[in-house]
Each structure stands twice: as structure tokens, then as C-alpha cells.
Amino acid sequence: MVRSTKGVTSVRVTSFLVSFIAPTLLVCAGCSAKEDPPEQGNLDLNFPTVESAVVTETISLYVFNASGPANRDLCQRLIASRTTAPGNWPTGVAPVASIERVRTCDVYTAPNRIKIPEVSFGERAVAVVGFAQSGQEILLGCTPLTTGQGNFGVPVTLAAVRAADLAVLEDQTACPTLSARCSNQCQ
């Protein structure tokens, strides 16, 4: 579903499967470990404009371990690093799980088929990078998240990496909506 309110376009992807699992603890030899079922989350991508959603060819999603006092500002560090050096995360910071370059139309039209590997419960940061058809990083967002048991929502508000670059792409689009683009109604 795409809705536009006051300049923000929200693409609600209802079943984008982001799975987290509880760590298994073995108490004694011969005891069976109880493993909690994975929890799944809905990813809500909030684009700055309808046009920015239309010109975003693919997205990549990254999950980072954000536990510990040193990682309280992890989302800010991830965004700062990616903004100043596109394609790079801060030194010593690597995602624990990711899915690379999923077509935005696939996320919009068939979200149930998109899954990332499972990671354990805890403090996490979920970062999303949006790419233009040229491969240029045009959008970026990050949300801190504490996972436990049960379903959860992951709202990620995307912002322009460089506003001028995004504006040029938005001005060039002939598609009025993401729905029109994904159903090949635009030239």
C-alpha cells in the first residue's frame, strides 16, 4: 500500500520477513534445549516523496548488533558514514545479516518472498539504503530496535543522501506513482 500524507510517502510492506531468534542455552548434557520460534517483522518504508519511491530502483536492508553502551548512537554513526563515504559502514562495524539489492517493485508487489537470515534477539539497528537505477545511493534510513518474542514493526524513514541528486532524479521521472511504475504503465 502506498499513501501520501504531507509530503511523506509510506510504503507499508506487510510481511517482509525480518526474523530474529532467541539464543539457545544448553544447561546440561543430555537436556534438550528449548528454542523459541523466530519472530517476524513488518518493514514500513517511509519515502520523503512519491517521486523518491518511484526513482528508487532497489533497496538493501542491513541488520547490525547495537548492544552495549558504545552502540547507543549506532544509527547516527551508520548514516554519517554512509553519507560521507557511500558504500561504506564505519570502521569495525559490519552487519550481522543483510539482503542486497531487492527491487523496490518486488518489495511493493510480493513482500512475502523476501527474507533475510535469522539473527538473535537483542538490541539491533536496521538500516535501509535505496539505490537509483544507476546504482547511486540516493536514500538512507536507520531504526534502532529491541527484539524479543512476538511480532514487531520496523518503521524506517528514508532521507536523501544528497538532496540535489535526488531532486534531479525526481524531476526526470515520468511515473506519477510507484504502483504505475511497478505495473509498467510509464515510459
Image (cartoon, rainbow, N blue to C red):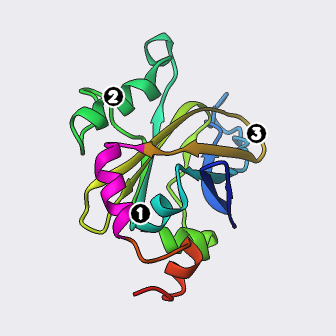
* Whole-percent x, y for residue 12 in the image: 67, 59
* Whole-percent x, y for residue 59 in the image: 42, 59
User: Of marks 3 and 2, which one's residue comes earlier in the chain?
Assistant: 2
Question: Residue at the spot x=30%, y=47% of the render?
Answer: 164
> Disc 1 marks which residue?
56
- Looking at the picture, which amino acid does disc 2 mark? Ala
> Disc 3 marks which residue?
149
Looking at the image, is mark 3 or mark 2 nearer the viewer? 2
Figure quadrant of residue 87: top left
Q: Which residue lies furthest to the left in this view?
A: 85
Q: Where, quadrant-wise, is the C terminus in this rendering?
A: bottom left
Look at the numbered disc 3 and give the secondary structure of its residue: loop
Q: Measure how far apart labels 2 and 1 are at the Cα level.
A: 20 Å
Q: Is residue 42 magenta?
A: no
> Disc 2 marks which residue?
80
Residue range of the region highlighted in magenta in the rendering = 160-172
How crowded is the residue under tag 1: few (<14 C-alpha within 10 Å), some, or many (20+)? Answer: many
Q: Which of 5 and 82 is in front in this view?
A: 5
- Looking at the picture, which amino acid does disc 3 mark? Gln
Q: Does the magenta stretch include residue 166?
A: yes
